[in-house]
Amino acid sequence: MKKRHKIALFIAYFLVFFSSLLLIDYYADMFFSFYIVAIASAILAFVALQIHKKYRTKTQVDELAKEIEEVL
């Protein structure tokens, strides 16, 4: 797996977790700090990336990462 693909996968996972956690936080009346949401999203994205690398399955996230690679 190339470095650009790993970065693109991380960005894709981060955006999914970040938007989900922000939506949950919005309906929880802004209970969490923005920084906590960002750090939690980064940690979850890193864990998801490691699991993705371990199983090496091609998913829709890979297609999204390929589009992100073109931008990078």
Image (cartoon, rainbow, N blue to C red):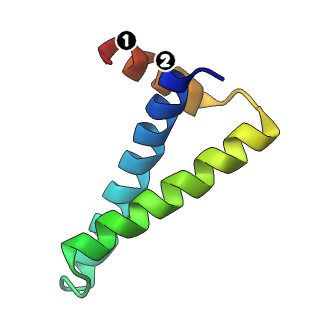
Residue at the (36%, 67%) spot, across then down: 39
Residue at the (60%, 52%) spot, across then down: 48
Residue at the (41%, 49%) spot, across then down: 14
Q: Quadrant of the C terminus?
A: top left
Q: Quadrant of the N terminus?
A: top right
- Element under label 2? helix
Give residue 28's position: percent from left, percent from top: 27, 84
Find disc 1 in the rendering and name its residue.
70
Q: Is residue 37 above or below residue 51?
A: below
Find disc 2 in the rendering and name its residue.
66
19, 13: nearer the viewer: 13
Q: Is residue 27 above or below residue 61?
A: below
Q: Would residue 53 be found to the left or right of residue 7 on screen? A: right
Contact flag, marks 2 and 1 (Cβ < 8 Å): yes
Give the number of the disc on residue 50: none
Q: Is residue 48 above or below residue 68?
A: below
32, 3: nearer the viewer: 3
- Element under label 1? helix
Q: CA distance from mark 2 to mark 1?
A: 7 Å
- Among all residues in the image, which is located at the extreme top? 70
Q: Is residue 72 above or below residue 21?
A: above
Give residue 9's position: percent from left, percent from top: 51, 35
Give residue 33's position: percent from left, percent from top: 21, 80
Give residue 34's position: percent from left, percent from top: 20, 72
The amino acid beneath tag 2 is Lys
The amino acid beneath tag 1 is Glu
